[in-house]
Image (cartoon, grey):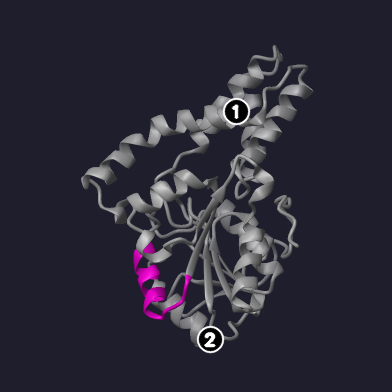
Amino acid sequence: MTNNIEADFRQVHDTGVTTRFLPGCSIEVIGDFCPGKPPEHVLFDFDGTLSLVREGWPEIMIPMMVEYLQETGTDEDPKALYDVCSKFVMELTGKQTIYQMFRLAAEIKQRGGTPLDPLEYKDDYHNRLMQRIESRRERLRTGEAHPSEMVVPGSIELLELLQKRDVPVYLASGTDEQYVREEVELLQLDKFFGRHVYGAQDDYKSFSKAQVIERILRENEVDGSSLLGFGDGYVEIQNIYDVGGTAIAVASDEANRDGRPDPWKRERLIGAGAHAVVPDYAEAERLIEWIWTGKE
């Protein structure tokens, strides 16, 4: 049985690993990787991998954490506290949100404060985030914004290509499941994923991305080599790598969306075991052809 506690980052490749680009495109292949048999099941992370509805979330989470740390009476200046929080928030990206709140509670205790239940911090963060993104959600509800404006470029085309190949797709997110399901519908992606949408629970031990992967493999009686996964967080990349699947790192620059990879994401995801890196899905057709046929 898979452990539902999400593991810490574990480096598989060092930063000096050799990479190459498929001819004439931005698909970066790690080491001497070559796709094997065509995948039978495909797993996606959500925020930053498909959805951009929550773009800018660190700008909400980190200042909130600084506020709580200042309440301990620490003499550290706000810039130092911001740097502390920024470091652990980004290092934990990919895990369920609650893990970042566990760390906040630990930092408060370390400074002599009495932390709240981490769920309270998570609720506060989510309420603040919703204030930032509600206008985006409303524009999607009313049709003022088209879903293509709030997804990683090429996402819909990629999902359509997978649908044409009759490959089932699954979604596993560290964001609370109720909100993931809402935003999947707002982005009109429910037609691709159907009931296969999984997200974080208040009982954090009852969900993990590794658990979703184990369920896919068990229920379909296939091994990990049948799995293709896309993600912009180390957890899903590491989990897919660990079962022998093909892990595609999505080093999305969520703010600029200019076709260039986010350097920090790229380095971290390569380290987590990615087999290839893309900045987005602008070259979705080329990517799928390579994964299915191995032709470069």
Residue assigned mark 2: 294
Image spot of residue 87 (x, y percent): 65, 38
Can residue 249 be seen here? The reply is no
120 versus 138 height, above or below = above
Q: Secondary structure at mark 1?
A: helix
Instruction: Give the mark, 2 or 1, whose residue is nearer the N terminus.
Output: 1
Magenta span of residues? 154-168
113 versus 20 height, above or below = above
Q: Secondary structure at mark 2?
A: loop
Image spot of residue 99 (x, y percent): 66, 40
Q: Are marks 2 and 1 in contact (CB under 8 Å)?
A: no
The image quarter containing residue 166 is bottom left
Residue 42: in magenta span? no
Q: Main secondary structure of the magenta part?
A: helix
54 versus 45 height, above or below = above
Marks 2 and 1, how far apart in space? 46 Å
Q: Residue furthest top?
A: 73
Mark 2 vs mark 1, foreground winner is 1
Mark 1 belongs to which amino acid?
Tyr
Residue assigned mark 1: 121
How many residues crowd mark 1 within 10 Å: few (<14), some (14–19), many (20+)?
many
Left or right position of 255 against 21: left
What residue is rendered at 53% in x and 79% in y?
A: 40
What residue is rendered at 65% in x and 30% in y?
A: 118
Can residue 144 be seen here? The reply is yes
The quadrant of the image that shows the N terminus is bottom right
Query: So how many labels did they put on this image?
Result: 2
The image quarter containing residue 119 is top right
Image spot of residue 260 (x, y percent): 45, 58
Mark 2 belongs to which amino acid?
Gly
Image spot of residue 240 (x, y percent): 64, 67
